[in-house]
Amino acid sequence: MFLSNLTELTMSQGYRRFFKVVPALSDELRAENYRIRHEVYCRELAYESLRPEGLEADAYDERSVHCLVQSVSTGLFVGCARLVLVDPANPTESLLPVEISCAATIDRSIVDPLALDRGRIAEISRLAVVGSYRRRQGEQNQPISISEEDFGTPKRPRQPYLALAVYLCLIALARHYRISTLFVLTEPRLAANLSRLGVRVEQIGGAIEHRGTRVPSMLSVDEIIGGMNFVVRALFEVVSREVRDGIEAAGPAAVRASHPPFV
C-alpha cells in the first residue's frame, strides 16, 4: 500500500482543497442525499425504479443518520451515505436490513445481532458517488469504489479523497453516536479491498444474491479507528471535526428533529 508515500499534511490539505463532509440534519440536506441516491441507484445503475419526485428513499431512512460529501469548488453535493440505526424503543423488532436479507445465511456462532447491545449497532448503507466522479474504467456500474490501486504507485501516487471521505464520515458519525459494531452487505471484492487498506472486515455468513453477489460482514468501530496509520488518522480527524462542526451548527433542535430516538 502506498499511503506511506503520502505525508500527513499532504493528505489532509489535499482533501480540504477538494471536498467537505456535511451531516444531513435538515430536510433540505436529507433531500440532497435522496437526490444523489436517485441519480445513482435509479438513473445510472437501475437498481431501483425511477421515482417521479427524483428522490430515492425507503422506510429505513426515518431511523438513519445521513451524511453528504460536498465539492469545495462547485458547492454541489457529490457523495452520500447513511447509518441505519436500531430504534431503542423497539430494539428486537426494528431489524437492520442485513438481518432481514441475510436471515438465513448469518452464522450465529460468529455473531448474533439480536444478542448484542442493540443501541450500539448500525448498518452502513446506501453509499453513492455521482457518476461524473466515478471516472475510472469499471467503476461506472458501481455506486462507490475504493481499492489499493486507488492510491497509485510509489512514483505516481493518487489520493481517493472522495471515497475515503464517505467512509470516514460514517466512522465519525458512528463514534459520535456511540456505535461500536457496524454491519455491511457488500460485494466480496470491496470487503477484500477494505481489508487491504487496513480495515478488518469479518464475514459473518454466506453470500446472497442482491444486485450481484453480496456477503454480510461486521466491523468494529474501535478497531477501525485504532488501526488507522498516521496518514489516514490525520484525514479522519479533519473529517471528524467537520462532522462535529456540522452537528453543533445545526443545534440540538435540528439533531432531535432528525433522529429523536437516538439523542
Image (cartoon, grey):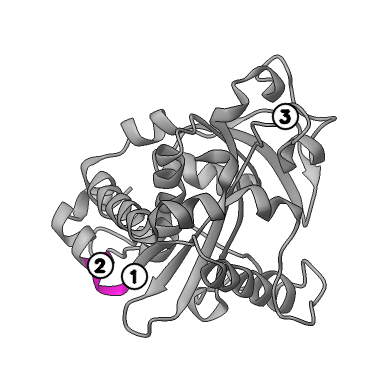
Element marked by disc 1: strand
Tell whether label 3 touches label 2 (CB within 8 Å): no
Q: Is residue 6 left or right of residue 47?
A: left
Tell whether label 2 touches label 1 (CB within 8 Å): yes
Mark yes or no: residue 150 visible: yes
Q: CA distance from mark 1 to mark 2?
A: 6 Å
Residue 198, numbered label: none
| Amino acid on which the number 1 mark rests in the picture | Phe
Q: CA distance from mark 2 to mark 3?
A: 38 Å
| Amino acid on which the number 2 mark rests in the picture | Arg
Element marked by disc 3: loop
Q: Which residue is mark 3?
A: 205
Closer to the camera: disc 3 or disc 1? 1
Q: Badge 1: few (under 14), some or many (20 or more) residues near its Cα, within 10 Å?
A: many
Rendered residue at 66%/36% (across/down): 87
Mark yes or no: residue 156 visible: no
| Amino acid on which the number 3 mark rests in the picture | Gly
Q: Residue 19 at what x, y percent from top left?
A: 34, 70
Q: Residue furthest front?
A: 253
Q: Which residue is mark 1?
A: 19
Element marked by disc 2: helix
Rendered residue at 26%/40% (across/down): 229
Nearer to me, 227 or 245: 245
Residue 227: quarter of image: top left
Q: Which residue is mark 2?
A: 16
Nearer to me, 241 or 88: 88
Whether 193 is drawn above or below 225: the answer is below
